[in-house]
Image (cartoon, rainbow, N blue to C red):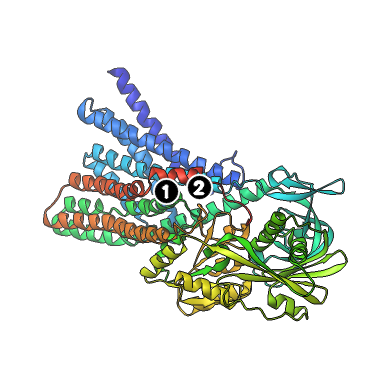
Amino acid sequence: MLGLEILLVGGVVYLARRAYEHLAADPAKPDSGAAPPEDDIDAANAAAIAEAEGVRESHALAVTGLGLAATGALVWAPATILGIGCIVYNTVDVLRTGWRKWQVERRVGAEFVDTSAVMIALGAGLCVLAGFAQWVYFVAIRLRLAAKGRLRGTIEGVFTEAPAIAWRLVDGSEVATPLDRLQVGDFVVVGAGELMPVDGVVERGEAAIDQQFLTGEAQPAEKTPGDEVHAGTVILRGRLVVRVARTGSDTAAARIEAALRRTVAYEQQLELRSERVSDSTTVPTFAVAAAAGVLQGAPAMLGILSSNFSSILRLLSPWSMLNYIETAAGRGVLVKDGRSLETLPRVDTVVFDKTGTLTLGELKVVAIDPLGDADERTVLSYAGSVEQRQTHAIAQAIAAAAAARGVELAPTTEVEYTLGHGVRAAVGGAVVLTGSRRFIQQQGIAVPDADDTGAGIHSRVWVAVGAAVIGSLVLAPVVRPEARALIDRLRARGLAVHVLSGDREAPTRALADALGIPNVHAEQLPEDKARLIDTMQVAGRTVCFVGDGINDAIALKKAALSVSLRNAAAPAVDSAQVVLMDGTLRRLADVFDLGDAFARDQRHNLIITMGSSVACVAGVFIAHISLATINLAFAASAGLGIAVNTLPTWSRRSPADGERAADGPRLEGASP
């Protein structure tokens, strides 16, 4: 027995010394061996690991404290002292946080109430209940951190892109090279209409670049040798040789960290909001406790101080958000910004971009209408030659038609791309234009009338050589098979639905009529789309914009809620708060249902914590309930909160959904 008593005393002294050092430590000073924080994914990973390690240690100490307290109550009484030491040591961090809050803000935080509740339970001899409540508390924290870790893995998996292609300059020749094989210092060639594949520095050439999604400026930026260029921007005219400064993997890492940072920022915002709610109850709790002490004596005062359960709310709110994001990922929806979950129930207007969003990205040439002496092969040859290095859907449809008919394409020079309207290039010494009617007319070329009234939702691309139009190509986009059912569901929710497009009024309205969309906005330039979103929101609407193109990036940033699709252009994916990972619109209505459920669970969290506290306070005054009952109520409230925030996640996440999300193709960096 003497050996056990010596061990017991030594353990108490050790815990006391560690607690004193922990409490006296200056949190503003980092450890001597700690590296300065860096704004990169490695630093974020290190911080996440450090946080998880700290919580794991606290949880282990809580388990030890509970076990020792139970041993003391059932087997060997002196073990209770060590159990109390473990419980008190775990409380030191909470007390330090409250003390710092008082020093900096002169605000009495809920941490003082939490500490008082633990000390009161220990003073009343309820060591096992105090240990059990602390164990439940740290279980909730560990579950929350586990959810955050799974979220990080999900986002990293989504943004690990399949290799895209860049044109690398090798011994004077352009070689198609997967992005993941590029090295810093390589040279890549980028022409008009192409997406900048990497971050780098212009080595040769001049070009006008659209970088609206980075800067918000509609005016193209002129780039010359020595200027920096950024991945995801679009060459409007000109041609550049760019020295690679950052590779595709670095760009992917930046996108991962940006997405994680948005979610973590919202998690912290929820914590602060819950903390403010908790702190607002501190002074009233002490006041009511004092009144109870005067009216009913010390037991009532201690009961009131133990009845503040707001610490549970600080855990449940951000954890609920992480669980819902994980649930969404399991259903094929990546929520990159947790604030979206709060915005969803407030959305009253959904605006769809037409091309690539309501329609499939693929187009098909369904007719060629030559004019004058030109024949179909000539029209297709000129159009295919001009569009051969473009990446948008129209260019791909024309290239596919040329390949299917065996039409040979000629090399081009002096390529100039006007975003969303057309291309100008030199082909065999002749100036060739392909694009919309407006684009051709803006070049001073007359365009004959064409009867497109029977063309349904078709689009027409005009081809001009020199100063004359030689014909046109009629293309038909394929409407997404799930679009009509989705629109019906959204309208059934009472949402106003709009479609906007850079295309003409007739095909845009024909598509809208086919899908049951009453509000149509056609012939919209990229800046017009953003202006329309702004106008709606100034008028008091809460807008969700759904788009997937390069020219949708600004509108996506302007909207209160932004949604894009897998395989969308990189600027659209980066700008969107929500990405539909299966590349379809099938899950969009489910996203709104998820937002409603999240709001409902947030209300449940408030009811569970505050309702339990109020019930215990009433029980102290009316039924004179004991401290043991109050501590059991705390543990029960925490357990119920964990169940409420976990069981809905399990029930909404089916194995099939998880397999689809895990096995499906990853996000691409550019549109097909």
Q: Farthest residue in the left direction?
A: 623
Q: SS of the residue at dot 2?
A: loop
Q: Nearer the viewer, residue 430 or 263?
A: 430
- The amino acid marked with disc number 1 is Arg
Q: Nearer the viewer, residue 474 or 581?
A: 474
Q: Nearer the viewer, residue 575 or 47?
A: 575
Q: Quadrant of the C terminus?
A: bottom right
- Earlier residue among tags 1 and 2: 2
Q: Is residue 405 left or right of residue 538?
A: right
Q: Which residue is mark 1?
A: 96
Which residue is found at the position 22% from the left and 40% from the top?
126
User: Is residue 212 visible in the rendered structure shown here?
Assistant: yes
Q: Which residue is mark 2?
A: 27
x then y, percent, for residue 626: 16, 47
x then y, percent, for residue 101: 43, 56
Which residue is found at the position 84% from the left and 48% from the top?
173
